Image (spheres, grey):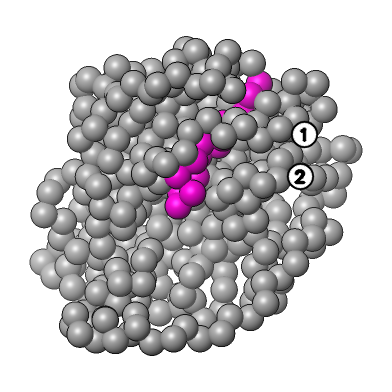
Amino acid sequence: MKPQHFLAGLGLPALAIAAALAAPPAPSPAPAQANLNNIKLPAGFRIAYYAQNVGGARELALGPDGTVYVGSKEQGKVYALPDRNRDGKADEVITLASGLNNPNGVAVRAGSLYVAEINRILRYDNIAAKLKNPPKPVVVYNKLPDDEWHGWRYIAFGPDGLLYVPVGAPCNSCLPKKPIYGTINRLKPDGSGFENFAKGVRNTVGFDWHPVTKEMWFTDNGRDQMGDDLPADELNRAPRAGLHFGFPHFFAGDVPDPDFSKGKSAASYQKPARKLGAHVAGLGMKFYTGKQFPAKYRNQILIPEHGSWNRSSKSGYRISLVKLDPTGKQALSYEPFAEGWLVGQQSWGRPVALLVLPDGSLLVSDDQGDAVFRIWYAG
């Protein structure tokens, strides 16, 4: 979030905002040093760098030949990370595109790379054969709002073959003027048939589908300026289209918005499948579908928690595990899986998105450390 957006969200007048922005910034503490030895994992697990110098690494996608594609935000770049010798480390970092409008989202279908900017979705055809000389992109869809606030697009193809794309709220909390805000939507691969799937979603930057039930699960970040411990961020289950998840009236199922809950009932909206920590910023969640990790992790949810930005005591900066019941419909527990990117109150990394590789290992992107990590089970 940009400073002017935050200050405006507090209701400050324009002159006060200008004065605040003109004031010299307070000195920042020295950043914590990157050290993989800080990362705590369950017994038998290991972590290493898959790639470094991947500026602002965000969403991850896998090509059929094993190439990993990476989106970014402010850097405006999209990267390719080939691992031709399959040694669990990228051979090189290739910049496929630059100068894009915060290309956070990436997805692969039928050999084409889909890239989601804030305001449009692009497609690069036959990308694996053209990593060093990418083709001119095809514009798939160009009618997304151009608001930067919660404008980062996480995209993925669902079991129905449709491309899913969220549109976050253009505010901390508000009644959006257009119905497209605060939603998850879907469209055909050619850009036609755009339709709404879910409403009342403040800002999701991560979703996936249960491998067995095929139901969508997604993270959603709660509003700010309600204190350190309210509201909880959410993990939601969307078993069908047309559901409303509460924004801007209620958060975490039962926390009323101080401005927009009057006359509304929490019972009218979907409750989260699991409350996460307040302000942890759960992002690119994934079901673990590999076979390398112990069986107890199969079809369970892993959530990268990007970390709080204005909490008095920082939270998040880790990967959490949510265990489900055998039906895949109920969340039973919520616990740390990998932590250590936060040392005291200083972070040296911020996990963003996950990707399960064909060998069953897990990739983790980090937009603070400009890196992609690989986690595997050594036994």
Magenta stretch secondary structure, dominant: loop
Q: Residue at x 36, y 39 (%)?
A: 117
The relative height of residue 226 versus residue 163 in the rendered view (above or below) is below
Q: Quadrant of residue 377?
A: top right
Mark 2, residue position: 49
Pinpoint residue 313: horizontal percent, then vertical percent.
Answer: 56, 79
Q: Return the residue nearer the eye: 301 or 164.
A: 164
Residue at the image point whose x is 29% and y is 35% from the top: 120
Q: Position of residue 280 (x, y in %)?
A: 51, 63
> Residue at left 36%, top 44%?
101
Quarter of the image for residue 79 reads: top right
On the rendered structure, is 316 left or right of 251?
A: right
Horizontal side, residue 22 vs residue 275: left or right: left
The answer to whether any part of residue 238 appears in the image is no
Residue 75 painted magenta: yes
Quadrant containing the C terminus in the rendered view: top right
Find numbered disc 2 in the image and state the secondary structure of the residue it sits on. Answer: strand
Tag 2 near tag 1, CB within 8 Å = yes
- What are the residue bounds of the magenta stretch? 66-79
Q: Residues within 10 Å of mark 2 (few under 14, many from 20)?
A: some
Look at 57% across and 34% down and name the residue there.
Answer: 95
Q: Quadrant of residue 138?
A: top left
Mark seen at residue 89: 1
Residue lying furthest right in this view? 379
Q: Amino acid at mark 1?
A: Lys
Residue 34 place in picture, x, y as percent:
75, 61
Q: Position of residue 298 (x, y in %)?
A: 66, 33
Q: Secondary structure at mark 1?
A: loop
Amino acid bearing label 2: Tyr
